[in-house]
Amino acid sequence: MSSLPCPCGSGASFAECCRPFLRGERFPDTAEQLMRSRYTAHVRRDPAYVLRTWHPDTRPAPEKLGDLSAPQWRGLDVTSTEDGGPADAEGVVTFSAHYEDGAGNPASLHETSTFVRVDGEWVYLEGSQFGG
Ligand SMILES: [Zn+2]
């Protein structure tokens, strides 16, 4: 279990990558780490983590987010990052998240996400999707 690769595709094991974030044992140092952990929370169907890492001004109602039971996520590619480091107050991460659509065909979601800090910890502020 502990040696399973992390769903976020970082190359590290789940135990050493996103699990401590999902458990609230650690906080991400960078916006990219937070973005990856939120992807992992989708894969592991952990809506509570997705909500608590969402900026309070833009966070959806829990019933709107749902239980994350769909779609089936198949992988993550982080294509670029801008700021979002340990000394930054804001960061931008562009990524492609791959999944299977309702018919089982491969599909991808492309998004540029903005992250800021609340009480010193990274949260997701907003994102804009593009392409297809
Ligand atoms: Zn991870």
Image (cartoon, helix red, strand yellow):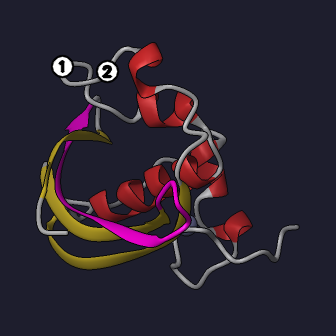
Left or right, residue 64 beside residue 41: left
Q: Amino acid at mark 2?
A: Pro
What secondary structure predominates along the stretch shown in magenta? strand
Q: CA distance from mark 2 to mark 1?
A: 9 Å
Q: Amino acid at mark 1?
A: Asp
Residue 102 falls within the magenta-colored stretch = yes
List x then y, in percent, for residue 59: 29, 23
List x then y, in percent, for residue 119: 29, 29
Q: Nearer the viewer, residue 74 or 18?
A: 74
Mark 1 — residue? 57
Q: Nearer the viewer, residue 62 or 56?
A: 62
* Residue 88 visible somewhere in the drawing: no
* Residue 120 visible somewhere in the drawing: yes
- Mark 2 secondary-structure assignment: loop
Mark 2 — residue? 60
Rendered position, 117 above or below 63: below
Residue at 55% in and 48% down: 41
